[in-house]
Amino acid sequence: MKTMMPLIAAGGLSVLSGSAFAQTAWDMPTPYPEGNFHEKNIAQFIEDVSGAVTITPHYNQTLIKHPEIKASVRDGIVPIGELLVSRLENEDAIFGADSVPFLATSYDDAKRLYDAQKPLMEEALGREGLKLLFSVPWPPQGLWTKEPAETMADLSGRTFRAYNTATEELASAAGMVPTQVEASDIPTAFSTGRVTAMMTSPATGVDSKAWDYLTYYYPMNAWLPRNMVIVNQAAFDALPEDAQKAITDAAAAAETRGWEASKAETERTTKVAADNGIKVTEPSEDLKSGFQAIGDKMAGEWQDKAGEAGTKLMDAYKQ
């Protein structure tokens, strides 16, 4: 972390001085590769605010590792960052709603869930001096395997790539062995045999060139997890009002644009996977019913864990 201090100190001075002679410069860590559609959306956001704030993106965990991004923004090490919403579920269950399997399986449902979840997320982030700028879903999650999976029994004992609490619980409930693997480490994890199956989007499958080590993709439409971009509230408040407005306006545009891009990415990346040899296969009734049963159980457990806030969210979502 010491090697980052000159960078942070310089950026911090620019924010605090409010000098008319130098535009504020921010560094922004992200967990995913530059070519990913989330990062392309962020690049457009950065361009849109360039007249107010100069933001330098650091893609694919090159500046800060994914698990540390939220704390780094909170602590002022960096003023802005992107992360997977459900990475924070262990801190507050409300952040896990979008990753409950089969709770929201379409873009329309995912948007209604976000509308119910958003004010509770903003409240939780606000308690830590953070501000939500925008949140965009991944394409629907599906099952990727090396060997065919016709039944739930076929999955028993397989090692499974997990990326949050929900995927760990899902794997265990399905009789698999979960192992935490970040998106950037997927190719290595599969090629070395650490994991043999995963539930992820076709976008991540393409980013990681899944055809190099996997054979089957079953579009389960299990859930649509979201990323979010957050900013340190104090850093945001230190900006001139016109710069603040530029950021919030660009964030609103990025959210709308990102949701549409996600829909397009679902179709595009599924085709890319198939064109590269992945066998895109409709899941069997046994797989669908088996995972649905697990999802139903996890939804109930999540609501219990989330308490009053979880009940409030579910009531709003079901209206």
Image: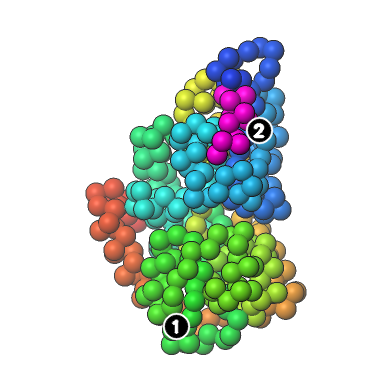
**What kind of secondary structure does the magenta stretch mostly adopt?**
helix
In the picture, measured across the screen, residue 296 lies left or right of residue 41, that is left
Residue 106 visible, this orientation: no
- The residue where tag 2 is placed is 55
Q: Earlier in the sequence, mark 1 or mark 2?
A: 2
Q: Amino acid at mark 1?
A: Gly
Circle 2 residues within 10 Å: few <14, some 14–19, many ≥20: some
**Residue plotted at (66% across, 59% down):** 265
Q: Amino acid at mark 2?
A: Ile
Q: How many marks?
A: 2
In the rendered image, the residue lying farthest to the right is 275
Expressed as whole percent of the image width and height from the top left, the position of residue 74 reads: 45, 35
Expressed as whole percent of the image width and height from the top left, the position of residue 143 reads: 54, 74
- The residue where tag 1 is placed is 157
Badge 2 element: strand
**Residue plotted at (44% across, 75% down):** 177
> In this rendering, is residue 174 above or below 114?
below
In the rendered image, the residue lying farthest to the top is 20
User: Which residues make up the magenta segment?
Assistant: 1-12
**Residue plotted at (67% across, 20% down):** 23
> Quadrant of residue 147 in the image?
bottom right
Any magenta on residue 263? no
Between the residue at mark 1 and the residue at mark 2, the CA separation in whole angstroms equals: 45 Å
Expressed as whole percent of the image width and height from the top left, the position of residue 43 reads: 69, 41
> Quadrant of residue 242 in the image?
top right
**Image quarter in which the N terminus is found:** top right
Mark 1 vs mark 2: give the one in front. Answer: 1
Q: Nearer the viewer, residue 27 or 85?
A: 27
Which label sits on residue 112? none
Any magenta on residue 11? yes
Circle 1 residues within 10 Å: few <14, some 14–19, many ≥20: some
